[in-house]
Image: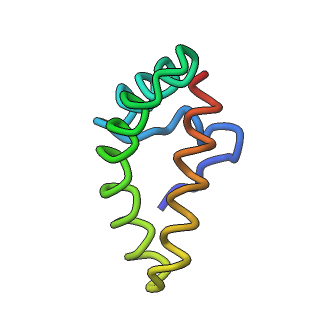
Amino acid sequence: MASVAREDMGRALPWPLAPLIASMAEAARRDDRETYDELFDCCFGWVYSVALRVTHDAARAEAVTAYVLREAVIEAG
């Protein structure tokens, strides 16, 4: 499996999350918490399931998911 450089991680968002992350960033810029929360919920399940498969630990998968989504929104914003 090819490795991805850390600086390329933000550009490597898997489809269909890239448009959702961009929409989350836009909602955050507009201070639209309701829309942001809805989009976060859409993304959370997918990212969490991948993190859980990798970590095999629910608490750690939640922490990884929150970190990944936060960083993705920062990168998209």
Left or right of 51 on screen, residue 31 = right
Question: In the rendered view of the protein, which quadrant contains the C terminus?
Answer: top right
Image location of residue 36, percent across then percent down: 43, 32
Colour scheme in the image? rainbow
Q: Residue at x 41, y 75 (%)?
A: 52
> At x 55% / y 77%, what residue is drawn?
60
> What residue is at 33 percent from the left and 66 percent from the top?
49
Q: Residue furthest top?
A: 30
How many marks are shown on the rendered structure? 0
Residue 13 screen position, x and y as percent: 45, 39
Depicted 6 relative to depicted 18: above or below: below
Task: Answer left or right for 56 relative to 8.
Answer: left
- Position in image of residue 9 (x %, y %): 60, 42
Near-viewer residue (31 or 9): 31
Q: Quadrant of residue 53?
A: bottom left
In terms of depth relative to the viewer, which is nearer, 64 or 16?
64
Q: Residue furthest right?
A: 7
Name above or below for residue 75 compared with residue 71.
above
* In-image side of 20 versus 61 (left or right): left
Which residue corresponds to the image point at 56% horizontal and 38% vertical from the top-left? 72
Quarter-of-image position of residue 35: top left
Q: Residue furthest bottom?
A: 56
Residue 24 falls left or right of residue 72: left
Say which of 5 and 25 sits in front: 25
Pinpoint residue 70: horizontal percent, then vertical percent.
59, 44
